[in-house]
Amino acid sequence: MNDERKIKKCVGPIIYNIEGKIFLMKSSKWRLGENGKFGEVWTVPGGEIEKDENGTEKETPEEALHREIAEELGIKISHVEHVGGSKKSGAEDFIKPNIDFEFIDFIARTNDKDISPNHEISDYGWFTLEEAENLPMIDVTKDFIRRCRRLVEERVAEFQAEFKIDKR
């Protein structure tokens, strides 16, 4: 019997805008626990690092990030920063429970306002960090946002200062 599990190496960013909000989306691939309905939880955009026919990664994590955001949202991101990562063992909250994940986490900003979501996105929006913390999310997404909260706040302040926006 082969107990070897597939590991999916994925990238995802917390994308922030000049208004101090972060982008979140719903995907039909995720749910909360084995009794939840798929597509009812919020997550960050992103996806798998592409591999060639030999299983070798054919793009860097940052290249994968830019590609995934362009494919899923139709926007460009900049000021990309790697902020760590996390792992998630296969669980009933992903559509294929026999897959383990290695997430490579980033934060990034965008000036784009018009999102063109692809078929993977059932809903999306821009949320304050406070609003985001109260949305239903899988554990790794919630931890990612909590872990990066201060850094996102600092980067938003820098972004606003760059354009001389006073948020008083």
Image (cartoon, rainbow, N blue to C red):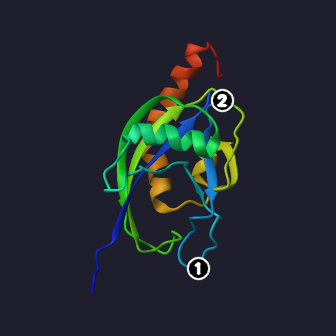
Rendered view: 41 above or below 90: above
Image x and y of residue 124, in percent: 68, 49
Q: Position of residue 31 (x, y in %)?
A: 58, 68
> Quick check: marks 2 and 1 in contact, CB under 8 Å?
no
**Position of 20 relative to 23 (above/below):** above
Residue in view at x 35 percent, y 68 percent: 6
Q: Amino acid at mark 1?
A: Asn
Residue behind mark 1: 35
Camera-side mark, 2 or 1: 2
Q: Residue 3 placed where, x, y %? A: 29, 80
Q: Which label's residue is closer to the chain start, 2 or 1?
A: 1
* Mark-to-mark CA distance, 2 and 1: 36 Å
Quarter of the N terminus within the rendering: bottom left
Specify the quadrant of the image occupied by residue 115. top right
Question: Which residue occupies 56% across, 41% down?
Answer: 69
Q: Amino acid at mark 2?
A: Asp
Residue occupied by mark 2: 112
| Labels in figure, total | 2
- Helix, strand or loop under label 2: loop
What kind of element bears circle 1?
A: loop
| Residue 149 visible, this angle | no
Residue 48 in view in this figure: yes
Q: Position of residue 160 (x, y in %)?
A: 59, 20
Q: Which sits in the foreground, 163 or 61?
A: 61
